[in-house]
Image (cartoon, rainbow, N blue to C red):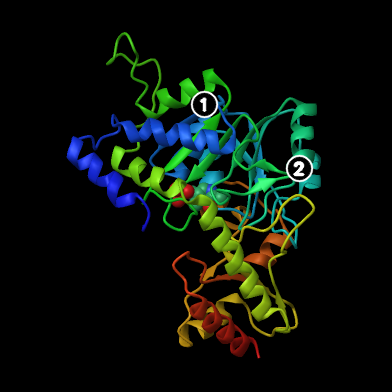
Amino acid sequence: MDGNEARYLQECIATGWISSEGPFVERFEAEMAARVGRRYGVAVTNGSAALEAAVVALGLGPGDEVILPTFTIISCAAAVVRAGATPVVVDCDPVTWNMDVEQVAARITPRTRAIMAVHIYGLPVDMDPLLALAERYGLRVIEDAAEMHGQTYRGRPCGSFGDLSVFSFYPNKHVTTGEGGMILTDDPALAERCRSLRNLCFQPGRRFVHEELGWNLRMSNLQAAVGVAQLERLDQFVARKRRMGRRYTELLADVPGLQLPLPATDYAENIYWVYGVVLQDEVPFDAEEAMARLRRLGVGTRPFFWPMHEQPVFRRMGLFAAERHPVAERLARRGFYLPSGLALTDQQIEQAAQAVRECVR
Ligand SMILES: *Cc1c(COP(=O)(O)O)cnc(C)c1O
């Protein structure tokens, strides 16, 4: 928070513009859109809400199937389920941890209407084959770029793909507004629809007469002011994250039994949103035990995502019955991530890496 955050917040206070009507909101939307090469941005309260609005904006509902990775945050599948549509999940790649695009092709049915591509932890989804599938079958694409501020896929910005893309500005994301999110699109009708859904579907002519139900998902000027200041330094944040990731890799490369994040693929260089590690089969305990050991050594960690097809809440709804996705199941049980925040010092990285070394020995 040591850029222009305080200055812009002070400006909000001094001018009295604190609500969503203030000028920083449109400025943040325009600057995010410009940054990822989109025409429109619609700022909302958080990334989960952005996904919900995106699904509804595309008109997805009962009878429609949406394909997404099982290895992701609940927000993705929840948005599909809440809209009354059916989530269809695919397993992920054991090395990039992103959705397996070949499995997407195998799960397309006459009811499939959309694909939700979710970039995971540091590397993007292999978008070209996914977009080719969408084109071939006439499917809509939602790109969840919540973890990918500043990342590119084959030189094109993450957040520029598909019909709609979403970002989160939660504090652990590369750009934060405390809480916040954004939907981006090139389609003026979709942008308008997202703006309407964000603002209770008030109608321009007859404000309190509603043809549809929306939400109040408006971002405040205070949040947007912080976002504008943060965005000014995104390149620095990304460079720092990459240095942190490379440093962890240097320190951990010779530790037996640990799978580390892939530094790069032919389409992207890892951005290390979080630095994940996976315990290989030779390690006689799982992530839960490793995390407990690290906690005793003074190092905080977080578990990997738990697969959507293993979520009790979805199983009780009768979703994903008897489905198995072994790569995601294994990652959930063997993977966790190390301290990855931008405020981490080089010395703390060394301490965390040393603790990992001791813990798996
Ligand atoms: C953080 C995140 C979200 C949710 O964003 P919130 O702002 O926390 O609601 C959605 N998708 C992915 C991939 C995320 O990492």
Disc on the earlier residue, 1 or 2: 1
Residue at screen point 50% across, 80% down: 347
Measured as percent of width and height from the top left, residue 198 is found at: 39, 29
The foreground one among 328 and 145 is 145
The foreground one among 54 and 160 is 160
- The amino acid beneath tag 1 is Ala
Query: Does the numbered disc 2 mark a residue whose Cβ is under 8 Å from ligand 1?
Result: no
Q: Residues within 10 Å of mark 2 (few under 14, many from 20)?
A: many
Residue at screen point 42% across, 44% down: 46
Residue at screen point 78% across, 34% down: 133
- Where is 110 relative to 221, above or below? above
Label 1 residue SS: helix
The foreground one among 143 and 156 is 156
- Where is 318 relative to 213, above or below? below
Residue 74 in view = no
Measured as percent of width and height from the top left, residue 77 is found at: 56, 45
Q: Quadrant of residue 196?
A: top left
Residue at screen point 36% across, 34% down: 25
Label 2 residue SS: helix
Residue 51 in view = yes
Q: Residues within 10 Å of mark 1 (few under 14, many from 20)?
A: some
Using residue 236 as the reference point, say whether residue 28 is left or right of it.
left
- The amino acid beneath tag 2 is Val
Query: Does the numbered disc 1 mark a residue whose Cβ is under 8 Å from ligand 1?
Result: no
Q: Which residue is mark 1?
A: 57
Task: Assign the N terminus to one quadrant of the image.
Answer: bottom left
Q: Which residue is mark 2?
A: 104
Task: Assign the C terminus to one quadrant of the image.
Answer: bottom right
Q: Quadrant of residue 285?
A: bottom right
Measured as percent of width and height from the top left, residue 239 is found at: 58, 59
Mark drawn on residue 112? none
